[in-house]
Amino acid sequence: MVTAQSVVEIMIQRGVEPNTVTYTTLMDGYCLRGQIDEALKVIDVMLHKGCSPHVMNYNILINGYCKIKKIDEAMSLFQEMLAKDLFLILLACGGWGDFGLHKSFLMRC
């Protein structure tokens, strides 16, 4: 993901501030590679820059956690979404059925 991060740095150097779409795309790339910690750092940068995470950011993180079978973390983010009155616009963990985890998550909601 060095390339994507480099593109963001070049944008900033050229005076183009990353926006929510930029950060969301970067997060998705990290999550697709199983690099959840890097995706979480992007959320921190977003907050520092004044960009509020939205439902898609949470969906990406929940999906990323599910892909690496960290359902407790996914559930924690889901609860955070509920507390912030954000709602899933997609079924974030579409792959849960592959792991038999979807029932566990839904039962805990």
Image: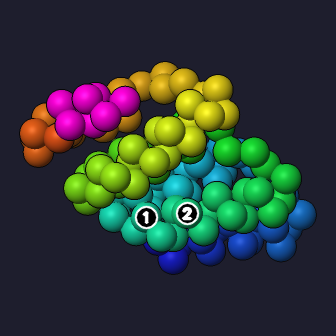
Tell me: 96 left or right of 70.
left
Quadrant of the image occupied by residue 87:
top right
Q: Which mark is residue 40?
A: 2
Question: Residue 65 at x, y = what percent?
Answer: 35, 54
Q: Amino acid at mark 2?
A: Leu
Indicate the quadrant containing the C terminus: top left, top right, bottom left or bottom right. top left
At 49% from the left edge and 46% from the top edge, which residue is drawn? 77
Question: Residue 20 at x, y = what percent?
Answer: 70, 45
Q: Is residue 91 above or below residue 58?
A: above
Farthest-out residue, front: 108
Queried whether the magenta region covers residue 26, the answer comes back as no
At 69% from the left edge and 64% from the top edge, which residue is drawn? 44
Q: Nearer the viewer, residue 105 or 22?
A: 105
Question: Which residue is identified by label 1?
Answer: 36
The answer to whether the residue labelled 2 contacts the one labelled 1, judged by CB atoms less than 8 Å apart, is yes
Tell me: 99 left or right of 80.
left
At 83% from the left edge and 73% from the top edge, which residue is drawn? 13
The mark total stands at 2
Question: Residue 67 at x, y = what percent?
Answer: 26, 52
Q: Is residue 43 visible?
A: yes
Question: Residue 86 at x, y = what percent?
Answer: 61, 28
Which portion, as a residue range, is magenta? Answer: 102-109
At 49% from the left edge and 22% from the top edge, which residue is drawn? 89
Q: Nearer the viewer, residue 67 or 17?
A: 67
Q: Amino acid at mark 1?
A: Ile
Measured Cα–Cα span from mark 2 to mark 1: 6 Å
Q: Residues within 10 Å of mark 2 (few under 14, many from 20)?
A: some
Tell me: 60 left or right of 96.
right
Q: Is residue 94 visible?
A: no
Which SS does the magenta portion mostly show? helix
| Secondary structure under the numbered disc 2 in the rendered image | helix
Farthest-out residue, right: 15
